[in-house]
Amino acid sequence: MRTTSQRRALSLLLVAGLGLAAASCGSDNKPAAQSSGGADAKVTITVGCEPPKSNPKERTAWEDDVKTFQGLHPNITIVSKDAFPCINPDTFQAKLAGGTQEDVFYVYYTDVQKIIKAKQAADISQYVGSVKEVNDLRKDVMSTFKDGDKTYGLPRNNYNMGLVYNRKLFTQAGLNPDAPPKTWAEVQEAAKKIAALGAGYTGYGEYSASNTGGWHFTAELYGLGGQMVSADGKKAAFNNDTGKQVLQTLYNMRWTDQTLGATQGYKWPDLMTNMVAGKEGEEEPEARPEHGAEGK
């Protein structure tokens, strides 16, 4: 695990690489950064996603990184743009089209290739080699920022999804905690055994509030080999037998097996803080059903 200083150093190096790229690339009629010419010319670049003042720890870390960077590169001035969230879907595309987007900006994972294809991102390939920590990044995640042998960005973070399960409850239900379910059918069977422990036990928990239901549906669809949109990006691809299979499984667990329980509308961190080890009074005594496994 990286220490905080290592993470900050990596962040700084990523900003360095992206900043240099932004300083050298722009649209046909407008430079991406202000410069008077020459390799050591004075350059000003804008960087988005500065933590808000309401998050003082991250804000201070950001400002320290900027100060350190500018100390190493005195010819480059960084103008940070306070933005929370880092990307506003209502204005993002308009800013790109209008040429008002920051030189270094944050973008959703699902939009990267679209931006690259639209030539709205700079090729930073020549700078990536100077960032030694780039070798620590997952190759599959890095591939998202590539088009052929060119690189157009670097990942800031990555969100992984999987199943979290309670080992103690698995043992109580006669399940092997060292052999967790590998298919949805096995998840359903394990949930039945946990729910059978009695009142107060729910076999499986699923997020659904605050838009998390759509994320999970997408991940579960991918897990079955499906896609949300067609390969050409022009048609919906979730409204088919695979999509119905995902929903049918959840329907069966809620209404047939009743392993999902009657309480719904969970959001982060409802389930994570209620993955207790047994009956009420242990670990997190909350007035919600215990959960043996949860979707994340």
Image: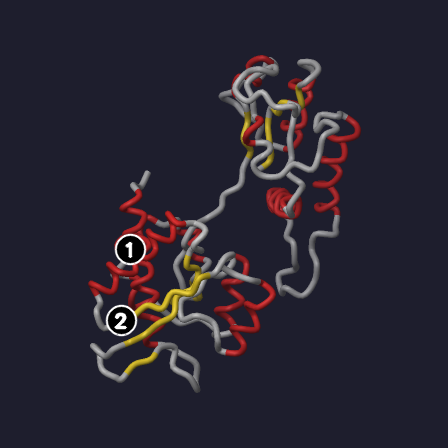
Q: Can residue 152 be seen at all in this image of the molecule?
A: no
Instruction: Specify the amino acid type for callout 1.
Output: Asp
Vertical comparison of 229 with 172: above or below:
below
N-terminal-most mark, 1 or 2: 1
Question: At 61% across and 47% down in the image, what residue appears?
Answer: 215
Q: Quadrant of the C terminus?
A: top right
Judged left or right of residue 235, residue 50 is left
Q: Can residue 95 be seen at all in this image of the molecule?
A: yes
Q: In which quarter of the image is the N terminus?
A: top left
Question: At 54% across and 58% down in the image, what residue appears?
Answer: 110
Vertical comparison of 38 with 45: above or below:
below
Question: At 43% across and 81% down in the image, what residue appears?
Answer: 27
x and y percent of residue 81 in the render?
42, 65
Please rate how many residues cluster around mark 2, counting C-alpha atoms within 10 Å: few if below 14, some from 14 to 19, many from 20. Answer: many
**Which secondary structure, mark 2?**
strand
Residue hosting label 1: 64
Residue 208 position by quadrant: top right
Name the foreground residue: 230 vs 66.
66
Residue hosting label 2: 76
x and y percent of residue 65 in the render?
29, 56
Residue projecting furthest to the bottom:
29
Question: At 29% across and 76% down in the image, what residue appears?
Answer: 43
Instruction: Specify the amino acid type for callout 2.
Output: Ile
Vertical comparison of 224 with 128: above or below:
above
